[in-house]
Image: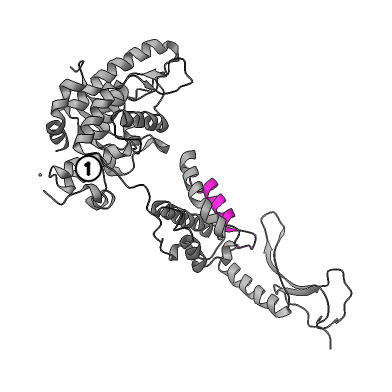
């Protein structure tokens, strides 16, 4: 009886002797080599045949593998044992974050690194929720909760990107809860007394050093005095403060004087949320600080001459370029040390202080939420819980009352 001919579209199963002699031409029970299967699914657009290959130790292994591969192809998937979790993460970081800055990509890359050390070599199609959970739990002693959450969310997004391109059938990382990591840097807020010391120190500190390599690395103290006064007394985010422009955003002669928050120093230049676009009345201490800094910035413009890069921003380098967050952090720490408050502070703590002082003074959470540009008061409560107090009573008026006595101490050139 002759061998039945394979029908059109059926899968091919052969035994590959890999160059050795055949010892059992029918069942190959004593032959070295492997069983192999081939699936043919028509042609690619360039005319090449669409072939998919599997292999196994036994014929039944290949039959099972062919069945799984056919089910996968029928579902529109195209997985591969060589497409690892690390490769999926690299694809997402390179192609799945359009419009994001290099700094943002680096943050996600660094967050994923310890997780990829655990499971990066694993084929994406074979990854299980249990393996993701085990990898995350193994990092709870070395990563802070926030870092662990960023790592987990980045993995979910990387697999979702691969899922959208039919590299995997489902996103198992999304089925796992993020475990709690070690305690990270606690959100901090200055007390009223510390805030007063900080503002006074920012005005009395000798000129600040911004770029040690420049011929004129010293900057007027009024630069950070204005930055701190605006950030502390209006609650703007650090990236919002750095993007404020003189003509389009600041109105020092208005009734009342105000600052408009319409953009941020981030990729795309947009603010964080739609409710982050807001206009805020400026307290008199911040107004006086801005007048003083405007005069000193005009003097720097004259010194810079042709080197001045006019971008209209309030907070700039000595040649008019946008002020970088690293420059701000370095100068801010110097002022904190000068004020006797230590180095463990960051510019974002000024925003937390704004929330804390308003809450201590009795302002309602809903009002504070609008002032800081949160999408809802729930965000204010969950992110700033340590600074909030459940009491009931508008930002600039409170700040004028709290810091009103500073005007004489902090500026002699206010208009």
Quick one: which residue is furthest to the front in this view? Answer: 340
Q: Residue at x 25, y 18 (%)?
A: 292
Q: Position of residue 237 (x, y in %)?
A: 31, 38
**Is 117 situated left or right of 34 in this image?**
left
Quick one: which residue is furthest to the bottom in this view? Answer: 1
**Is 1 situated left or right of 302 in this image?**
right
Q: Nearer the viewer, residue 38 or 129?
A: 129
Quick one: which residue is furthest to the right in this view? Answer: 21
Find out whether residue 333 is within the magenta segment: no
Q: Position of residue 403 (x, y in %)?
A: 16, 30
Q: Nearer the viewer, residue 317 or 181?
A: 181
Q: Nearer the viewer, residue 77 or 398?
A: 398
The residue identified by callout 1 is 355
Provide the secondary structure element on which disc 1 rests: helix
Quarter the N terminus occupies: bottom right
Quarter the C terminus occupies: top left
Find out whether residue 95 is within the magenta segment: yes
Q: Quadrant of residue 121?
A: bottom right
Q: Residues within 10 Å of mark 1 (few under 14, many from 20)?
A: many
Q: How is the image coloured?
A: one colour
The magenta span reads: 79-97
Q: Residue at x 47, y 45 (%)?
A: 107
**Is 224 situated left or right of 110 in this image?**
left
Q: Position of residue 59 (x, y in %)?
A: 73, 79
Q: Nearer the viewer, residue 267 or 14?
A: 267
């Amino acid at each position: 009886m002759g061998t039945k001919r394979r029908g059109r579209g059926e899968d091919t199963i052969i035994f590959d002797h890999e160059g050795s002699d055949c010892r059992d031409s029918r069942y190959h029970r004593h032959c070295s080599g492997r069983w192999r299967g081939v699936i043919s699914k028509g042609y690619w657009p360039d005319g090449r045949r669409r072939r998919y290959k599997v292999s196994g130790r036994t014929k039944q292994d290949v039959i099972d593998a062919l069945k799984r591969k056919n089910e996968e192809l029928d579902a529109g998937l195209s997985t591969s044992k060589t497409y690892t979790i690390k490769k999926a993460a690299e694809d997402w970081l390179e192609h799945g974050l359009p419009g994001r800055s290099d700094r943002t990509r680096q943050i996600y890359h660094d967050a994923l690194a310890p997780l990829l050390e655990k499971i990066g070599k694993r084929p994406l199609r074979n990854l299980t929720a249990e393996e993701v959970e085990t990898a995350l739990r193994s990092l709870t002693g070395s990563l802070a909760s926030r870092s662990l959450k960023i790592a987990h969310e980045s993995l979910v997004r990387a697999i979702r990107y691969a899922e959208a391109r039919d590299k995997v059938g489902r996103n198992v990382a999304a089925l796992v809860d993020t475990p709690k990591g070690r305690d990270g840097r606690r959100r901090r807020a200055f007390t009223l007394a510390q805030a007063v010391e900080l503002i006074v120190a920012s005005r009395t500190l000798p000129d600040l050093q911004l770029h040690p390599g420049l011929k004129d690395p010293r900057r007027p103290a009024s630069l950070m005095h204005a930055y701190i006064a605006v950030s502390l007394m209006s609650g703007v985010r650090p990236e919002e403060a750095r993007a404020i422009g003189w003509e389009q955003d600041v109105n020092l002669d208005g009734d009342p004087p105000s600052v408009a928050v319409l953009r941020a120093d981030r990729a795309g230049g947009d603010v964080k949320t739609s409710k982050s676009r807001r206009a805020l009345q400026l307290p008199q201490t911040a107004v006086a600080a801005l007048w003083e800094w405007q005069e000193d910035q005009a003097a720097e413009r004259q010194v810079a001459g042709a080197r001045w890069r006019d971008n209209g921003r309030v907070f700039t380098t000595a040649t008019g370029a946008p002020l970088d967050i690293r420059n701000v952090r370095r100068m801010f720490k110097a002022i904190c040390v000068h004020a006797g408050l230590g180095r463990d502070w960051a510019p974002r703590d000024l925003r937390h202080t704004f929330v804390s002082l308003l809450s201590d003074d009795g302002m309602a959470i809903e009002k504070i939420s609008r002032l800081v540009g949160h999408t809802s008061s729930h965000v204010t409560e969950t992110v700033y819980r340590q600074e909030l107090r459940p009491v009931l009573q508008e930002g600039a008026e409170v700040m004028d009352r709290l810091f009103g006595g500073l005007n004489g101490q902090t500026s002699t050139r206010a208009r």
